[in-house]
Amino acid sequence: MTAPATKSARFGQATSRLPDLAFRIGTGGFAWVAVAVVVLVGILLAVSSSDVFRTFGLSFLTGTTWDPVAQVYGALPFIIGTLLSSSIAIVLAAPIGILTAIFLAELAPRRVAVPLTFAVELLAAIPSVVYGLWGVFILGPFLKTTVGAWINGALGWIPIFGGHPDATGLFTAGVILTLMILPTIVAISRDVITAVPDSQREAMLALGATRWETITKSVLPYARSGVYGALILGLGRALGETMAVTMVIGNSSQLPKSIFDSSQTIASQIATTFSEAGRGLPTSALIGLGLVLLVITMSLNVVARLLVWRVAGPGTDRR
Amino acid sequence: MTISLSKRLGALALASATIVGACGSPAATTTPTTAAVATGPAATAGPTTPQVPSGNVTLAGAGATFPALLYQVWIEKFTAANPSVAINYVANGSGAGITAITQQTVDFGASDAAMKDSDIAALPADTTILHVPTALGAVVVIFNVAGVDTKPITKLNLDGPTIAGIFLGKITAWNDPAIVALNPDVASNLPATPIKVIHRADSSGTTNTFTTYLSAVSPDWKNGPGAGKSVNWPTGDGAPGNDGVSGGVKSGDGRIGYVELQYAVISGLSSAAVKNANGKFVQGSSDGVTAAANGALATFPADFRAAPIINGPGDTTYPIASYTYMLVYQEQTDAAKGQALVAYLYWALTDGQKEEKAIGYAPLPDQIQQKALDELHKITSGGTPIWGS
């Protein structure tokens, strides 16, 4: 506050205060617009979906039937579809992503790390509709006859691995999502691992620890909450992903019994049915779905950011 | 969507070239020529055909995907003949068309399903919507399954209860006794392949027509999923749009789905012959739909809001057909736009009808066409009819 005061004294009060003030209000105003948009979206979703919550109450969240003819709306199949497809993705992406990040941050020589990092980040540049197309025509049919058939054959006696593997379904959607969230997980994990102070490593090495011991006993525990944050940000991306999932998940509003069943996520249900949804309750129900998704992803993002900041400080959570 | 649309336009150019020649004389009796129609309303209504306004006008429309291809052709031909008028049509679905015209963001809406009473109640106060029927189309059952001889099966007979059984998930294999019994000629060739249903994921007029049929032929369907623009499908995968369903059926062995006739033609998939009310197995076709429309003339409602035409009488009638509509306000607030709109609708109901057969739609029966033309006289601007009688 003191610096501007001396400045304005030098140039004269009347001329300097106005542009300064305008600049301050202008920039601040635009910054607050972002906050206002989030708040307004939240309010709009809540208001527009009030119909469906008034009609069904909490059973909107727990109902298993989504029947536009009978006007019965239960979101559970989509909530389960969203959580299951994202869970498959995170279970597959977590080990791959963390190990990649460790390699890039700790082990790889620079001439390997730079192009590899670039390649992983390129995964994020592939449009999601291209992932979807690839999933429909190549990955889905491939998984059906190989990995899917194998899991189904070996573990089919467990209900969640039963059913008939097909090119479309939860499993294919999960694998596609795995690829889509890997760049997020790798980039942030690598950042938080790099941010671990060298004193930690040097202390371990001074004690005669091997590379493996240094990483598992010192670096990873230090970076742990940041890595959790990376995983949750990845999960957040998986939860909201729409296009690629819509193309491979099968768009079925029945509750899935197995990871090979067709299912539907909240995001793809909204995307596929919104344009022709009738006004009143059907639209309100879809907006209610949007609100549920917003609440899930927002709370996850808040948790993730706090975790990342704890290790690496604000500003490292780039996607 | 874009890719297949351009493909369709390509196919269309070929198709119109061949079919315009082929349907010349027999169509003259069922499809009125411009001259015949121009004198038709002239006798009862007025001496003039509606003219476009002198200034430049842009009309905006939105709605059904089912007639979108037809509308594209119409718009192209009409605006070529009337360069002062530009028409933008966004094919975003019947429900969206109804919403858009209700909120008055477009000059005309389009829908395959007539507006429900609740839709009409939601209109702005003191406004009236006119349903102008523009065409008829068939919904066909497409399938993709290799026979025991490993070649794709191209001919298949199905009846209502069997189709309902398949879409209910009760008939699960292609060699199910119900399917075998309907297809004695190829019975030994039907494989044990599991049936996979592909249905619409979005809310759609095509689904409304198809599920109305299923409800009519199967009590289980009627008491279960029921009829509507989107329903709670008991089995199968959803795919967006008619293109999505035909693509989904095409992409795997043992699949079955339903689309508007022309989408089956474009995708090259075989469609089932469906048993009609007279017990005959009929392939979906423009003629089969015309027969259905003619059979249902007596039940055509005065407010034009006709239900899908299901199981109509007649040997050649295809049992799953539907009208599609343009929705316009009776009172046009913008006189120039109203004038252009009436001219366009008049053209669509007369010259436009000749385009329909070539691209798999069925032209309106004469009687309905006349009713629709009479309806155009009701359109007013500032309280005076735009196309005076």
Image: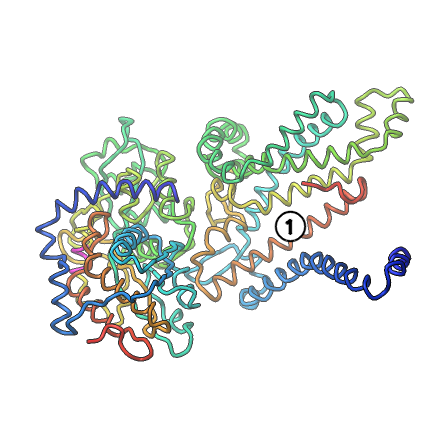
* Dominant secondary structure (helix, strand or loop) of the stretch shown in magenta: helix
| Of B349 and B219, the residue lying toward us | B349
Please name the residue shown 23% across and 48% down the image.
B360
Q: What residue range appears in magenta?
A: B290-294
| Of A277 and A157, the residue lying toward us | A277
Q: Where is residue B331 in the image (x, y as percent from the top left)?
A: 33, 75
Please name the residue shown 26% across and 39% down the image.
B270
Q: Where is residue B9 in the image (x, y as percent from the top left)?
A: 29, 43
Q: Mark 1 points at which residue?
A: A297
Residue B275 left/right relative to B236: left
What chain does badge 1 belong to? A
Please name the residue shown 13% across and 74% down the image.
B44
Q: Does the magenta run of residues contain B293?
A: yes
Q: Is residue B198 above or below residue B227?
A: above
Please name the residue shown 29% across and 56% down the image.
B79
Q: Position of residue A200 (x, y in %)?
A: 87, 30
Query: Residue flagged by tag 1: what amino acid is it?
Result: Thr
**Residue A20 appearing in the image:** yes
Residue A58 left/right relative to B313: right
